[in-house]
Image (cartoon, rainbow, N blue to C red):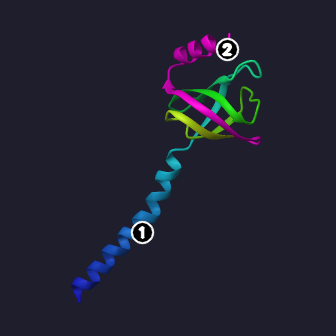
Amino acid sequence: MLKRQTKKCTATFILLAFLVFFPLVAVSSSVTGVVVLEDTPGCDHFVVETSGGYSLLEWYGGVVTIWEGDKVFGEIHSYGFKDIYIDGRGEMRVWVEDYWVSDRDALEYFHSNCR
């Protein structure tokens, strides 16, 4: 009887741990940032500042214009095509060229692609 109760308690604990920690893992890939460099509509490249550094992005569809100061939400701490959300205006498809870069590298990226 004690062995059966122990198994039941263990199963309940595992289920609760899964329900508590799994949503945290899913949410952790989404990043909040702020657009700090842009030159729309003349250039498709822009820079977003996040808590981990700067993400270097290129526009590929969706919301057409962005402005410095726009809040951005999405998975911009990994390479490749991503769908991000521009606060209050909608979704945008971007290519993440790089992330967690320094301010110097972000400026160089922006000026080499947009000036």
Q: Earlier in the sequence, mark 1 or mark 2?
A: 1
Q: Amino acid at mark 2?
A: Cys
Identify the element where label 1 is drawn. helix
The image's mark for residue 114 is 2
Residue 87 on the magenta segment: yes
Residue 90 pos. (x, y %):
74, 42
Q: CA distance from mark 1 to mark 2?
A: 50 Å
Of residues 15 and 97, the one nearer the viewer is 97
Q: Amino acid at mark 1?
A: Leu
Of residues 41 and 108, the one nearer the viewer is 41
Identify the element where label 2 is drawn. helix
Q: Residues within 10 Å of mark 2 (few under 14, many from 20)?
A: some
The number of callouts visible is: 2
Q: Residues within 10 Å of mark 1 (few under 14, many from 20)?
A: few
Please tell me whether residue 19 is drawn above or below residue 83 in the rendered image. Answer: below
The image's mark for residue 32 is none
Please tell me whether residue 25 is drawn above or below residue 9 in the rendered image. Answer: above
Residue 7 on the magenta segment: no
Kindly identify the residue that appears in the image at 40 percent across and 64 percent down.
17
Residue 37 pos. (x, y %):
67, 21
Which quadrant of the structure image shows residue 33? top right
Kindly identify the residue that appears in the image at 76 percent across and 32 percent down.
64
Residue 18 pos. (x, y %):
42, 64
In this rendering, position of residue 111 left or right of residue 52: right
Tell me the magenta residue range: 86-115
- Identify the residue at the far bottom of this view: 1
The image's mark for residue 16 is 1
In this rendering, position of residue 54 left or right of residue 84: left
